[in-house]
Image: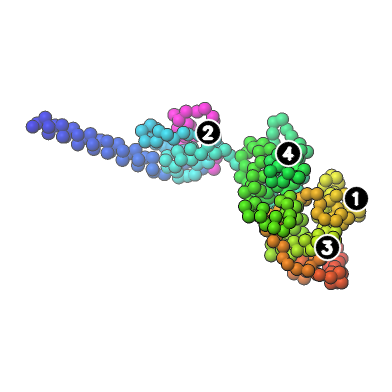
């Protein structure tokens, strides 16, 4: 009988010990602790084992219960693989939260903003500046990377470069990313934004994807007011239908950039140049997009308003970037005269 009592007592003591151990361990790994390195990136190099990683974290006061954390990994979270990367650990943070972050393997990133309406020339310049390489490459070399149309050959087999397919938005990009990787990221973003039913809508209105991207890029440059973009689209389609040159100044700006002579002003030579992008002279659409367009510009290109408008002029009364629209040359002439009078006062 004494034997069984002793055995029971040992069992109870062992249970209490195990329970106490489990409580201590879970309390230790769940408890957030403060540290002084919340604003400093900590780099975990490739090839380090769990013990080495935990030692680095302990030395930087990120983890202040190293034994409990090691035991937790050893007995309760054996499948966790701690990844190399650059990490910011907020303060306070618990060891369990630290381990969760270490599963991601996230590299240090920075924000890359590509504004709507930018051409591939501006984009190449920004990528070359923000993502230096070894050996160094300049914006011309980045621009040459944008001639790789294999990224979009299934979408737009007639495209000669990636103009229009580098989606404008703000990206989180790894600090050591190569410009080529960023270009791929931007094209993939374009593909994710392009909605499944847009292809059917493009076919319905008799346009290819390349033509829709081109029209959207024209709309993007002509109006920044989302509510009127369908009206701008109607002018473009009406002019195309009636065989009237589009006369969009943004294409003359694009020509100057293509010829590496853009200085911020449209010159007479830019307007009179014989060039397939000069919509003052050609009939129909230019050969391709002239910039990166936003989603609202695509929606307008696919769903133009039903109007008889052929012209538009900046609405100087409102001063919000919107336009007056006209169906006749006479109405347009009056609006243009008012605009030019306003413009003269600004000079």
Residue sitting at x 44%, y 37%: 63
The residues colored magenta run 39-61
Q: Nearer the viewer, mark 4 or mark 2?
A: 4
Q: Is residue 197 left or right of residue 73?
A: right
Residue 84's disc is 2
Cα distance between the residues tagged 1 and 2: 56 Å
Residue beneath disc 3 = 242
Given residues 274 and 339, the one toward you in this image is 274
Residue beneath disc 1 = 274
Residue sitting at x 31%, y 40%: 23
Residue sitting at x 86%, y 53%: 278
The picture quadrant where one finds residue 319 is bottom right
Crowd rating for badge 2 (residues with CA inside 10 Å; few <14, some 14–19, many 20+): many
Q: Is residue 148 left or right of residue 39?
A: right
Residue sitting at x 74%, y 46%: 163
Given residues 217 and 24, the one toward you in this image is 217
Residue 148's disc is 4
In this view, the residue farthest toward the left is 1
* Up/down of 224 relative to 109, above or below: below
Crowd rating for badge 3 (residues with CA inside 10 Å; few <14, some 14–19, many 20+): few
Q: Quadrant of the N terminus?
A: top left
Q: Quadrant of the C terminus?
A: bottom right
């Amino acid at each position: 009988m004494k034997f069984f009592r002793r055995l029971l007592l040992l069992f109870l003591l062992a249970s209490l010990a195990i329970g106490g151990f489990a409580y201590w361990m879970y309390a230790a790994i769940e408890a957030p602790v403060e540290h002084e390195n919340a604003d400093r990136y900590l780099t975990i190099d490739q090839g380090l084992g769990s013990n080495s990683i935990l030692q680095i974290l302990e030395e930087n006061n990120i983890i202040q219960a190293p034994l409990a954390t090691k035991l937790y990994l050893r007995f309760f979270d054996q499948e966790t693989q701690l990844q190399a990367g650059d990490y910011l650990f907020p303060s306070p943070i618990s060891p369990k939260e630290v381990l969760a972050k270490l599963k991601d393997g996230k590299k240090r990133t920075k924000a890359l903003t590509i504004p709507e309406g930018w051409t591939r020339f501006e984009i190449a310049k920004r990528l070359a500046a923000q993502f230096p390489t070894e050996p160094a490459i300049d914006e011309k070399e980045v621009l040459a990377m944008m001639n790789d149309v294999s990224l979009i050959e299934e979408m737009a087999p007639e495209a000669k470069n990636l103009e229009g397919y580098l989606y404008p938005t703000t990206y989180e990009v790894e600090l050591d990313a190569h410009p080529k990787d960023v270009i791929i990221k931007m094209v993939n973003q374009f593909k994710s934004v392009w909605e499944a039913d847009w292809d059917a809508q493009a076919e319905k209105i008799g346009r290819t994807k390349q033509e829709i991207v081109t029209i959207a890029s024209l709309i993007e440059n002509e109006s920044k007011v989302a509510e009127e973009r369908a009206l701008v689209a109607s002018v473009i389609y009406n002019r195309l239908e009636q065989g009237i040159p589009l006369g969009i100044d943004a294409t003359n700006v694009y020509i100057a950039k293509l010829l590496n002579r853009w200085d911020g002003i449209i010159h007479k030579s830019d307007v009179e140049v014989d060039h397939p992008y000069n919509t003052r002279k050609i009939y129909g659409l230019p050969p391709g997009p002239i910039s990166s367009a936003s989603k609202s510009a695509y929606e307008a290109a696919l769903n133009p308003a039903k109007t008889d408008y052929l012209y538009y002029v900046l609405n100087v009364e409102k001063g919000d970037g919107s336009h007056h629209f006209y169906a006749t040359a006479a109405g347009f002439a009056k609006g243009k005269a008012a605009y030019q009078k306003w413009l003269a006062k600004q000079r």
